[in-house]
Amino acid sequence: MQAAATFRRSIGHGVPIRPATYAQAHRQAAMLYIHDLAQDGASLRDIAGLLLDQLPEDWRSSSERSDLRRLADAAAQMIVGGYRLLLGSRPPT
């Protein structure tokens, strides 16, 4: 009975197993968007041009570039198996 209740909660029926904050959902959506653009051949600078109102003057040493790189790296980790953490599973060993 407990397993069935947990399963129903995990697929969105009833009280969520683990509440996801809006900040996490927004970050994860941005990660996937950045990953998709990179897979289509866009550079970090191209992606920044789409996401930012204005590119920083010194792109090479900007915090925006570092932030985009971290999001792209996190997305790559999520794609290769980190998504399991969202489901409450351990990463593969």
Image: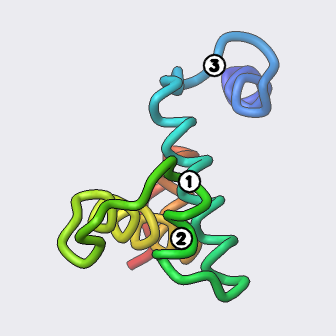
The answer to whether mark 3 and mark 1 are in CB contact below 8 A is no
- In this rendering, the answer to whether 83 lies above or below 15 is below
Secondary structure under the numbered disc 2 in the rendered image: helix
- Counting residues from the start of the chain, the first of labels 1 and 2 encountered is 1
Category of crowding for the residue at label 3, using alpha-carbon neighbours closer than 10 angstroms: few (below 14), some (14–19), many (at least 20): few
Category of crowding for the residue at label 2, using alpha-carbon neighbours closer than 10 angstroms: few (below 14), some (14–19), many (at least 20): few
Measuring 58% from the left and 65% from the top, which residue is drawn there? 34
Q: Amino acid at mark 1?
A: Leu
Q: Where is residue 38 drawn, in percent x and y?
A: 61, 79
- Counting residues from the start of the chain, the first of labels 3 and 2 encountered is 3
Name the mark nearer the viewer: 1 or 2.
1
Q: Which mark is residue 16?
A: 3
Q: Which mark is residue 88?
A: none
Q: Residue furthest left?
A: 61
Q: Where is residue 40 drawn, in percent x and y?
A: 72, 83
Q: Amino acid at mark 2?
A: Gly
Q: Residue furthest bottom?
A: 41
* 71 or 49: nearer the viewer: 49
Q: Where is residue 85 drawn, in percent x and y?
A: 47, 52
| Colour treatment of the image | rainbow
Secondary structure under the numbered disc 3 in the rendered image: loop
Category of crowding for the residue at label 1, using alpha-carbon neighbours closer than 10 angstroms: few (below 14), some (14–19), many (at least 20): few
Q: Determine which residue is flagged by label 2.
A: 81
* 51 or 79: nearer the viewer: 51
Query: Which of the image's four quarters has the C terminus?
Result: bottom left
Q: Determine which residue is flagged by label 1.
A: 51
> How far separated are the C-alphas under marks 3 and 1?
31 Å
Q: Residue furthest front?
A: 57
- Counting residues from the start of the chain, the first of labels 3 and 1 encountered is 3
